[in-house]
Image: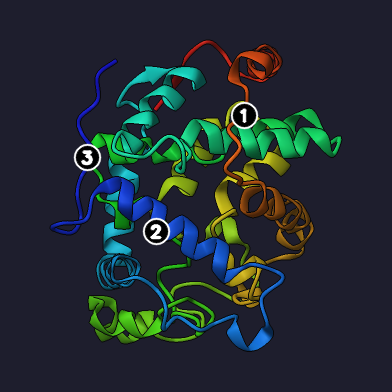
Amino acid sequence: MNLPSPANPTPGVSAHDTLEQWEEFVRQRYDPNRKKEDFRNYETATPGVREFYRLNHSLMTRDFVLARKRKYLPLDKMRMGVWEAMEQLEALVDDSDPDTDLSQIDHNFQTAEACRRDGRPRWFILAGLVHDLGKVLCLLGEPQWAVVGDTFPVGCAWSDKIVFREFFDGNPDAQVPELQSRLGVYSERCGLDRVDMSWGHDEYIYHVMKPYLPEEALYILRYHSFYPCHKENGYQYLMNPHDERMFHWVKEFNQYDLYSKSNEKPDHTAIRPFYEDLVAEFLPAAVNW
């Protein structure tokens, strides 16, 4: 299946550069060995990262999110399996140096293998394998700012826990009083399932995998980039007791997503048979995207 080339959100910045810079920024931001005073120091962020968040925060309106849900959540764009999706994502790193930069498949395998080494349940390992496959949105023409990055609720005031909070000043929703109160269009402890999250690969892969995976895995997929909540403890007032229980799994998963990356490429030939069996256990040969 041939997909269009990745959208380039910023002149002179490739899709690969944007993804790599963002992912490195996230790793640095949440490195548990960093000193506390360095934890929210963004002065050293690259221009590409700052531009990414400027675009994300100024353009991610509630109307944009609702429009993207209407466009993509019928899941009628294509049918393909997990392996084809991972291979398609190789297009995001065509310009990378294979000696220093890892592909999306390598990251997926590294995350899943770390889960596997720790004896995690099979559904948890599978969540590690597929958690970033929603990035195929880039290959459907979506700009990077609408695919990756920290996620957050839309429809209520933006938390100070969100990185580069100041860039929301340029968002049209900042001029809508209804959307700028603590609860906005929501109610106290309403539950995250009733909250519209910023659009991106998390929300998309959640819906793609919803018919097939257990709820714990689906929480991981849907909220693994919701750092203002699961790492910074923001937005607790929107969560109900069930969310709080399920977020145990989101927090457990985070260590494998962030800290499994290394320059050592996984041996695809050796490990792929295990993952072929794992995928076949939970998923059909092709799913709707």
The residue under label 3 is: 141
User: SS class of the residue under badge 1?
Assistant: loop
| Pointer 2 or 1: first along the chain | 2
- Mark 2 burial class by Cα count in 10 Å: few <14, some 14-19, many 20+: some
The picture places residue 91, in percent across and down from the top left corner, at 31, 31
| Pointer 2 or 3: first along the chain | 2
Between circles 2 and 3, the one closer to the viewer is 2
Q: Are marks 2 and 1 in contact (CB under 8 Å)?
A: no
Mark identifier at residue 21:
2
From the viewer's side, name the closer residue of 237 and 51.
Answer: 51
The residue under label 1 is: 266
> Would you identify the image quadrant in which residue 89 lies?
top left
In space, the residues marked 2 and 1 are separated at their CA atoms by: 22 Å
Q: Is residue 48 above or below residue 220?
A: below
Q: Is residue 103 left or right of residue 282?
A: left
Q: Is residue 76 above or below residue 227?
A: above
Q: Is residue 279 left or right of residue 59?
A: right
Q: Residue furthest right?
A: 119
Q: Is residue 202 left or right of residue 267?
A: left
From the viewer's side, name the closer residue of 25 and 262.
Answer: 262
From the viewer's side, name the closer residue of 194 and 219.
Answer: 219
| Pointer 1 or 3: first along the chain | 3
In space, the residues marked 1 and 3 are separated at their CA atoms by: 29 Å
- Residue at coordinates 63% horizontally, 16% vertically from top-left? 272
Instruction: Name the residue type under label 3.
Output: Gly
> Would you identify the image quadrant in which residue 215 lies?
top right
